Image: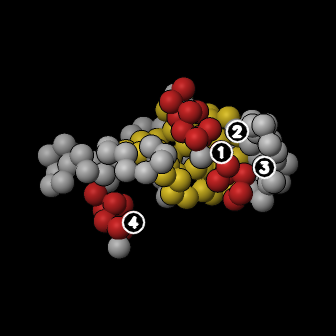
């Protein structure tokens, strides 16, 4: 299972930090998938305001076997404009080598009805 191997290869999580502009960019790249998971219909030509607020990263330790093959996993806490789910955690994988159309892959998302401390999942 590719997913299990990827999870096993990830190093320890970073400290929780303020979301970078790059994390915000990652959220925008996967925003259509986020909309789908929130059961929102996409509005042509309009972007919803998903605001990255915090992030945690995990990457492969440089000394481990196969280092660099797995890239970086981002866990991003996002404020949404959705009343029922005002907060989400989005998990995005950035492989070191881009093989598809997008340079990142949406991995998972957790929906919250209130604000919680960001965790890895």
Q: Nearer the viewer, mark 2 or mark 3?
A: 3
Mark 1 to mark 3 CA distance (whole Å):
10 Å
On screen, 55 above or below 69?
A: above
Sequence-wise, which precedes: disc 1 or disc 3?
Answer: 1
Q: Which mark is residue 31?
A: 1
Residue that numbered label 2 is attached to: 50
Q: Which mark is residue 3?
A: 4
Q: Residue at x 32, y 43 (%)?
A: 96
Q: Position of residue 7 (x, y in %)?
A: 36, 61
Sequence-wise, which precedes: disc 4 or disc 3?
Answer: 4
Sequence-wise, which precedes: disc 4 or disc 1?
Answer: 4
On screen, 75 above or below 7?
A: above
Q: Residue furthest bottom?
A: 1
Residue nearest the observer in this picture, 54 or 100: 100
Residue nearest the observer in this picture, 15 or 69: 69
Asked whether disc 4 touches disc 1, contact meaning CB atoms under 8 Å apart, the reply is: no
Describe residue 56's horizontal placement relative to residue 76 as left or right: left
Residue that numbered label 3 is attached to: 42
Helix, strand or loop under label 2: loop
Mark 4 to mark 2 CA distance (whole Å):
26 Å
Asked whether disc 4 touches disc 3, contact meaning CB atoms under 8 Å apart, the reply is: no
């Amino acid at each position: 299972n590719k997913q299990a191997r990827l999870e096993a290869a990830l190093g320890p999580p970073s400290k929780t930090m303020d979301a970078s502009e790059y994390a915000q960019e990652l959220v925008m790249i996967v925003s259509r998938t986020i909309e789908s998971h929130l059961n929102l219909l996409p509005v042509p030509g309009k972007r919803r305001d998903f605001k990255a607020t915090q992030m945690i990263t995990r990457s492969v330790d440089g000394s481990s076997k196969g280092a660099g093959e797995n890239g970086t996993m981002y866990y991003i806490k996002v404020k949404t404009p959705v009343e029922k789910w005002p907060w989400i955690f989005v998990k995005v994988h950035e492989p070191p080598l881009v093989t598809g159309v997008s340079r990142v892959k949406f991995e998972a998302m957790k929906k919250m009805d209130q604000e919680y401390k960001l965790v890895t999942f």
